Image (tube, helix red, strand yellow):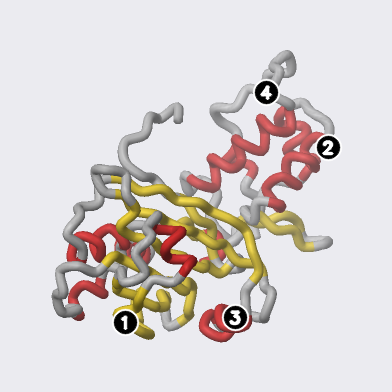
Amino acid sequence: MKSGAKKVQDKLAIDKNSVIPIYYQLAKFLEEQIQTGRLQPGEALPTEMELAQQFGISRMTVRKAIGELVAAGMVYTQQGKGTFVSVPKLDNVVFELDNYNQEIKERGLTGKATLLEARIVRANQQLMNKFQISDENTRFLYFRMVLAAEGEPLAYERKYTIYTKRKPILESELQDPSLTKLVSAHSDSMPVSSKKVLQVSVATKEEASILQIPIKAPVFVMEQTVYNAEHQPVGWSKSVYRGDRYQLTAYDGWHSKEG
């Protein structure tokens, strides 16, 4: 493969007096070159010597910059051949938690939400704690579903909403697994805010079986609580996402660019 040296010659002046480390300046510049398509997947980066000469820095500094990109999965090295831009993989896809189907579609994948179970359940101690209630006769609509892309299971979700409207469960509602929409459809209280808590955990036997991963494999666990105008919980969900397949990011409401 041809060297990508010509594509990294413009718009970078190493500031050796900056508080930002030189290797980091170079790493961020090469990252930008990759993200903007100037360096294409499978294309070779310039050699350490070429980059060192081009920017007037040491080969050790260049090596450290490339190490940052390798750690981020943006490039890979082949002994005796050089360093190459990685082909984007599903592992590095970032999904919007509230827009699963949209994110899947935008990335050219085929997504599917499969309902595993939907039934009415009575309150237990866990649900009474989560919903801050004391009435053991409170009824909940309980959903279990698996989210997949290209036939591969990626997430296992369990959702609870206080059930008061006694409306039938419509198949169309399952095309968008948003907890807030389920609450709106099956509760007398309108959701106005939510809180999400992300934790790192390991897969249980049940989760591993559904997600087709080893027991105790690393997973992301997202708990979401939906509140009404009186800040009373009206919906709660626990979602388990495969840690080996993608990263997670969530935006809830307006946020500033500096936030």
Q: What residue is drawn where x is 62% and y is 53%?
A: 74
Marks 4 and 2 in Cβ contact (< 8 Å): no
Disc 1 crowd, CA 10 A, few/some/many (<14, 14-19, 20+):
some
Name the residue carrying label 1. 118
Name the residue carrying label 3. 208
Q: What residue is drawn where x is 64% and y is 43%?
A: 5
Residue 229 visible in the snapshot? yes
Residue 73 percent across, percent down from the top left: 64, 56
**Comes first in the chain, label 1 or label 4:** 4
Asked where in the image residue 150 lies, by quadrant, the reply is bottom left
**Comes first in the chain, label 2 or label 1:** 2
Q: Is residue 195 above or below residue 153?
A: above
Marks 3 and 1 in Cβ contact (< 8 Å): no
Residue 250 percent across, percent down from the top left: 43, 49
Left or right: 181 as drawn, with respect to 153:
left
Disc 3 crowd, CA 10 A, few/some/many (<14, 14-19, 20+):
some
Disc 4 crowd, CA 10 A, few/some/many (<14, 14-19, 20+):
some
| 212 vs 87, nearest the viewer | 212
What is the spatial separation of the Cα atoms under label 2 and label 3, in whole angstroms?
45 Å
Name the residue carrying label 4. 14
Eye-nearest disc, 2 or 3: 3
**Comes first in the chain, label 4 or label 2:** 4
Residue 59's label in the rendered image is: 2
Asked where in the image residue 131 lies, by quadrant, the reply is bottom left
